[in-house]
Image (cartoon, rainbow, N blue to C red):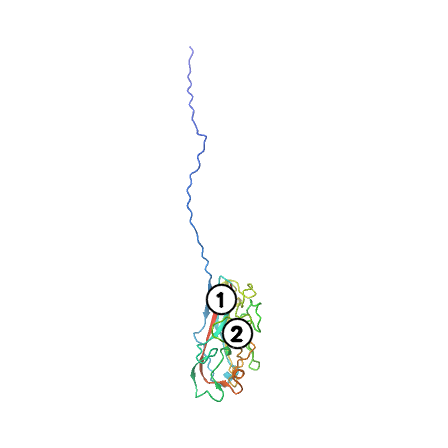
């Protein structure tokens, strides 16, 4: 007997067309605001007293070593300078007289003491002042002896008391006047925290000296150019001397972006 065999073919159909992968996107906009940072940390007494109550102090002067410590952190190129200021109660460019001893005002006694009689010395030299043109680029020289008056350390002052920054002919602690380039007249951004500590361009120990001399004419007082004398004899003639009393002034340290 013949058998009839029926075969049922079952086909599984697979679509040959590939569908695109589903995708959804969202964006977040990120904004970065780089604010320039200029940070000057200063460790110092609020007031430094120089009391001249002994003849030797008049002749040799009084020095306050490392009385001010300056620490700099910055994200931009910068300059640092000091400027002497006062309220001008006896005239612009002079110490303020708070108390005078005796009648004074005659026989050569003079209360017009120039702000520049204050001397500074910075422990670390200014390594970024090749653009300087004056006799002294900074305050790194040792204090000169009384027998050899010099403007190497006399404080920069603005005669008009307008707060005008020093020019290329004057002293800067770091950097200098102008916008030539980093190294020539600016210090690159950085911090005392990472730049070598006590021997870096970001750390300065400041000494102060006042030397009245005998008589008290302040021979180390020089104008901002470092060469023009401002001692009392040069300014007022022979026989002049400082009127005894109490005098005050301020020293401002200014950290400035070098743009």
Taking depth in this image into account, of 12 and 99 the one nearest to the observer is: 99
Q: In the displayed structure, would residue 123 be above or below residue 57?
A: above
Q: Quadrant for the N terminus, please.
A: top left
Question: Of callouts 2 and 1, which one flags the residue occurring earlier in the amino acid sequence?
Answer: 2
Residue 247: x percent and y percent? Answer: 45, 80
Report the number of discs.
2
Residue pointed to by mark 1: 256
Furthest-bottom residue in this view: 107
The residue positioned farthest toward the top in the image shown: 1
Whole-percent x and y of residue 236? 52, 84
Query: Residue 121, labelled with which disc?
Result: 2
SS type, badge 1: strand
40 or 89, which is in the foreground?
89
The quarter of the displayed image where residue 11 is located: top left
Callout 1 environment at 10 Å: few (<14), some (14 to 19), or many (20+)?
some
Nearest-to-viewer mark from 2 and 1: 1
Secondary structure of the residue carrying tag 2 is: strand
Specify the label residue 71 is tagged with: none
| Separation (CA) of disc 2 from disc 1 | 20 Å
Give how far across and how far down residue 123 sits, in percent: 53, 71
With 27 as the anchor, is 147 left or right in this view? right
């Amino acid at each position: 007997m013949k058998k009839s065999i029926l075969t049922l073919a079952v086909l599984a159909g697979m679509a040959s067309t590939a569908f695109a992968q589903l995708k959804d996107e969202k964006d977040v906009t990120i904004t970065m605001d780089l604010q320039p940072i200029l940070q000057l940390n200063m460790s110092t007494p609020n007031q430094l007293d120089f009391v001249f109550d002994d003849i030797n102090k008049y002749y040799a002067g009084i020095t306050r070593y490392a009385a001010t410590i300056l620490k700099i952190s910055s994200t931009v190129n910068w300059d640092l300078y000091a400027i002497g200021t006062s309220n001008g109660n006896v005239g612009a460019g002079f110490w303020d007289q708070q108390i005078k001893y005796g009648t004074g005002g005659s026989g050569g006694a003079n209360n017009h003491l120039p702000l520049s009689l204050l001397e500074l010395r910075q422990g670390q030299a200014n390594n970024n002042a090749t653009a300087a043109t004056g006799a002294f680029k900074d305050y790194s020289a040792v204090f000169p002896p009384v027998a050899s008056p010099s403007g190497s350390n006399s404080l920069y002052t603005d005669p008009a008391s307008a707060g005008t920054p020093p020019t290329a002919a004057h002293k800067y602690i770091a950097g200098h006047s102008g916008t030539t380039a980093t190294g020539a007249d600016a210090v690159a951004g950085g911090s005392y925290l990472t730049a070598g500590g006590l021997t870096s361009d970001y750390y300065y120990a400041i000494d102060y000296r006042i030397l009245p001399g005998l008589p008290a004419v302040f021979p180390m007082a020089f104008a901002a150019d470092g060469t023009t004398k401002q001692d009392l004899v040069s300014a007022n003639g022979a026989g002049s001397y400082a009127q005894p009393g109490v005098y005050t002034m301020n020293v401002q340290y200014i950290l400035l972006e070098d743009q």
